Image (tube, rainbow, N blue to C red):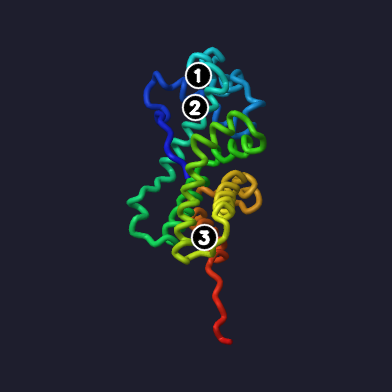
Amino acid sequence: MTTPARGPMRGKTEAQEPREKLLAAAIDLFSAYGYEPVSTGQIAAAAGLTQSMVHYHFGKKSRIWRAVIERLMYERGLAFPIADADLRDLDPLSRLKVIIRRFFAANAVDPNLNRILMHEGTARSARLRWLARRYMVAGYRFFDQAIDEAIEAGMIRPLPTADVTKIIVSVCAMTSSLSVLIDEIYNVDITRKEFLISHGDSIIEVILKGLEPQQIDQSN
């Protein structure tokens, strides 16, 4: 769904440690509260550092927010590795199933990106435009293409592609975003392997069964 951002992994050297602490704190705060309520002072305090360290490493809040997105996108790319070689020998419907399963698992393992997207997606802003154009458009188009190929092969019904993409993305992302609520209700950790397998299979069964071509009654 996303392409990896160009950025370092967490905690590579001592020199990066303050920056990594600030990023980790910012990820937690932006995912919990959104952009506006969070200050650089709060980020510094959560990281156990001074506010001057935020300015030294990032300059201002908007830059640490972008660094947070780039980090999460980088890690999402590692968690959601889809290469042409993985899909090359599969028929269009099987390719779509693989993509859905891997996308759901990547969302469930780390919900922070989706929680930030939920905050940002409620109002138009320069941040939202940057986020959509830099990352999200390509991700949605990736699903669009897989769905179009399955439609062209006659393996799923020719419903509006964008509608199908939005349904799949929403189902996968919402489960991750509401992981705490789901745990409270069902006492289940959605990052556990057995849940990822079971829920991923259920998503595919419910969505793709509904997309199967309608059978024509030829008895008459």
Res 123 seen here = yes
Question: Which x, y percent locates residue 97?
Answer: 46, 58
Amino acid, disc 2: Ala
Looking at marks 1 and 2 on the same chain, the residue that comes earlier in the sequence is marked by: 1
- The first of marks 2 and 3 along the sequence is 2
What residue do we see at 51% from left, 15% from top?
Answer: 53
Q: Mark 2 and mark 3 in contact? Answer it, CB < 8 Å.
A: no
Q: Secondary structure at mark 1?
A: loop
- Residue with the most extreme bottom position: 220
Q: CA distance from mark 1 to mark 3?
A: 42 Å
Residue furthest top as drawn: 52
**In terms of secondary structure, where does tag 3 sit?**
helix
Which numbered tag is attached to residue 84? none
- Would you say 51 lies left or right of 149 here? right
Q: Which mark is residue 67?
A: 2
Q: What residue is shown at x 51% (from left), y 46% (from top)?
A: 140
Please name the residue shown 48% across and 56% down the image. 148
Quadrant of res 220: bottom right
Q: How packed is label 1: few (under 14 Cα within 10 Å), some, or many (20 or more)?
A: some
Q: CA distance from mark 1 to mark 2?
A: 8 Å
Image-quadrant location for residue 207: bottom right
User: How many numbered discs?
Assistant: 3
Q: Which residue is mark 1?
A: 58
Disc 2 and disc 3: Cα gap in Å?
A: 34 Å
Q: Are marks 1 and 2 in contact (CB under 8 Å)?
A: yes
Answer whether labels 1 and 3 touch (C-beta < 8 Å). Answer: no
Q: Position of residue 48 (x, y in %)?
A: 54, 20
Horizontal side of 127 relative to 150 (left or right) equals: right
Residue under label 3: 204
Q: Position of residue 189 (x, y in %)?
A: 55, 49
- On screen, residue 154 versus residue 114, left or right, reads left
Q: Earlier in the sequence, mark 1 or mark 3?
A: 1
